[in-house]
Image (cartoon, rainbow, N blue to C red):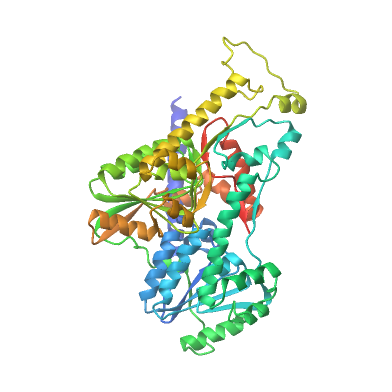
Amino acid sequence: MRSFFKIFLASFLALLVFCAIGFFFFMGMASNAVSSSMPVITDPSVLKINLAEPFTEISSKDVQSMVQAKSLEETPSLYDVIRLIRKAKTDDRIKAIYLEANGNANGFASSDEIRTALADFKSSGKEIIAFGNTMTQKAYAVANIANKVYVSPSGDFEWVGYRVSYLFLKGALDRLQINPQIFYAGKFKSATEPLRAEKMTEANQLQTSVWLNDLYADLLQKTAAERKLDTAVLHQWANEGVIVTPRLAVEHKLIDGVRYDDELQSEIKRQLKIDSTDKINFVSISQYAQVNKDLGGSGEKIALIYAAGNIVDGKEEEGVISDGMYVDLLRKARMDPSIKAIVVRVNSGGGSALASDHIWREMKLARAVKPLMVSFGDVAASGGYYMACAADSIFALPGTLTGSIGVFGVIPDMSAFLKNKLGVTFDGVSTGPLANAGSIDHPMTEQEKKIVQGSIERVYDQFKQRVAEGRKKDTAYIETIAQGRVWTGLRAKEIGLVDSYGGLQDAINAAAKKAGLKEFAVKEYPRYGNLLERILGFNKSSSAETMVKQELGPEYAKVYQQLKSVKQMTNSVQARLPFEFFVQ
């Protein structure tokens, strides 16, 4: 036994020494990577922004880039991008912005925030040059703010109008003999349509047509203003398919010219007044973020809490809004005397109605003691709106999708599938007719259905009451704009669901003003893990999502996410946006 302990202790000590050596070796490698990859901002430099890169609410480490390219580059968050563009405006070394505009991986509201920041940069007299080999409409919606817009002569320029596509699963469920058993409140509550229909209902067609045309009208109006064209003419060109090549886009004054990369580089060099043989110092937005770490400001503290993703029960961490975690965050911010105001950034299509209500309660308590502002991102609907409606003021952009005040529940009957496809059957003994209610092993009885629908109606009524209280309206009015209907931020302000048009910075400024702060420091929450945890991939869910996107691509990854959402929405009351849609 003594010999065993000696061997065990020696092995354990060796393991500790090995881990320590490995840790310091790794950190040394990381340190060398940082020092070797630290960008140099020379005069003149050009800030490069790639719109095909998704700028999420919370910045993330590009671990793969660090390992493969010996770089610790971090993809900046959307708010960081806005602040970095603002900083570049007054940075004498940054002479221009180069906008890489092949595609645009950001949502409509996020794109609008970026475009507004670019317009502010442009007002300084510095130039913005946009270029794409193939320029999509979503990329052009941002790029059209540039002083010069160019496309490759052999590339493509898209001008055909917007289309939204939905994925329907009813046919697959029918073949599998799975009966979803759906309950909902609100005629526009179309989150369950992929499970109960093979095409869009008339109500969903109506609401989708309205918000999609709002987004399209925004594109036409902004393009017309920048390019000195008429919106009706722009609409006609799209309908008739007039612009099918970059050269035709030049002829119709949508872009300024066609250029190959070498021609574009020569033009930039002439503008910067550098020798034709010299290299342009392009600084990516990620590199610029590396040398501008402290963007939070100084002074009294404002807590900025990011709430992005599906709303779920429990205390999950990265990638979702779990009520356990966000109640704690809000409570700490409320009770911390050093925090003078709170801003919550909501980017969520909703989820668990119960979790939404828990977060709403803590928002209401916070508002009672401190200024509480909410900023809506691309989506702040259903449960995302539920949790936010207690705020002092709500800020949204015209392209934000919000509303969807309605609830639903799904309790699948898997008995036929299990019996006929897998040969699995069930049997048991109960003490009463409702003891097995909600189980997947049988079709629901009328009594069970009545109980579930009653629960859905009660949550819907509570949802409307929460909104009526927060928006200072009566519930009868809220019913007229509820019913699960989705609204753009443009219409949401008109009907009283939001208070002001504006981005995240506008909400922060409003919070500071209400708190009486002339100078303030923005402290961002939540904070996920340390660098070592991220590098070693301890966050399994985040790694899994990344792998799916790498294997399937962004569009098919959205299909995977929708299938995952179907699983999440079963056996609980949900306040969720109509299912995943793809705007092309």
Image coords of residue 188 (percent x, y): 57, 43
**The one of 162 and 202 positioned closer to us in this rendering:** 202
**How many tags in the picture?**
0
Image coords of residue 213 (percent x, y): 58, 59
Image coords of residue 501 (percent x, y): 41, 59
Image coords of residue 153 (percent x, y): 67, 79
Tell whether 6 sits left or right of 218.
Answer: left
Residue 314 seen in the current view: no
Tell whether 343 sits left or right of 38.
Answer: left
Tell whether 190 sits left or right of 293.
Answer: right
Residue at x 61% of width, y 39% of height = 192
Indicate whether 370 appears above or below 142: above
Residue 581 seen in the current view: yes
**The one of 1 and 408 positioned closer to us in this rendering:** 408
Q: Which image quarter holds the C terminus?
A: bottom right
Quadrant of residue 252 within the rendered picture: bottom right
**The one of 5 and 550 positioned closer to us in this rendering:** 550
Residue at x 67% of width, y 14% of height = 427
Indicate whether 7 appears above or below 161: above
Indicate whether 493 appears above or below 194: below
Tell whether 309 sits left or right of 123.
Answer: right
Indicate whether 483 appears above or below 283: above
Residue at x 43% of width, y 54% of height = 493
